[in-house]
Image: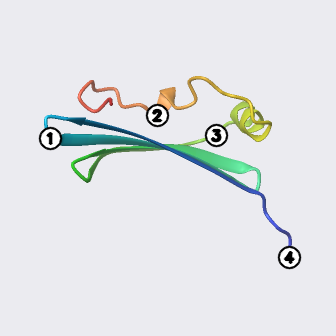
Amino acid sequence: MVKTEVYNSVSTISVYKNGKGKTKIQRVRIRDGKGFKEIVHRQNGRVTHKTRKVLNRKELGAIQTCKFKPGLFRDCLPTTANNIL
């Protein structure tokens, strides 16, 4: 059996204002040379928006060589201003 290389990264941003909480979770997972990026928006414990996209080869190479990729999650953001954290 061949071992597969797995890379996981999770970052969480929380904002509390007037007793209500908003959370944005950004995830990256790479396995067997394929990967995805995902953003989940939560408000008061409920998921309000979720986007999941496949990583392209340039993004995979940058992540695997530990290079910072600015704007990695930019295309996963919602288009409405109400859901942006």
Mark 2–mark 4 Cα distance, whole angstroms, equals 35 Å
**Of callouts 2 and 4, the N-terminal one:** 4
Q: Position of residue 71 (x, y in %)?
A: 56, 24
The mark found on residue 55 in the picture is 3
Measuring from the top left, give residue 85's x and y in whole percent: 33, 31
Mark 4: few/some/many CA within 10 Å (<14, 14-19, 20+)? few
Residue depicted at 64% across the width and 40% down the height: 55
Quadrant assignment, res 32: bottom right
Could you say whether the residue bearing mark 1 is in a helix, strand or loop? loop
State the CA–CA distance, disc 4 to disc 1: 51 Å
* Left or right: where 25 falls relative to 34: left
Dot 2 or dot 3: first in sequence order is 3
* Secondary structure at numbered mark 3: loop
Q: How many numbered circles does the render carry?
A: 4
Residue 29 in percent (x, y) is at: 62, 50
Q: Which mark is residue 19?
A: 1
**Label 1 with label 3: CB-CB less than 8 Å:** no
10 Å crowding of disc 3: few (<14), some (14-19), many (20+): some
Amino acid under disc 3: Leu
Name the residue that disc number 2 marks.
Answer: 76
Which residue is labeled 4 in the image? 1
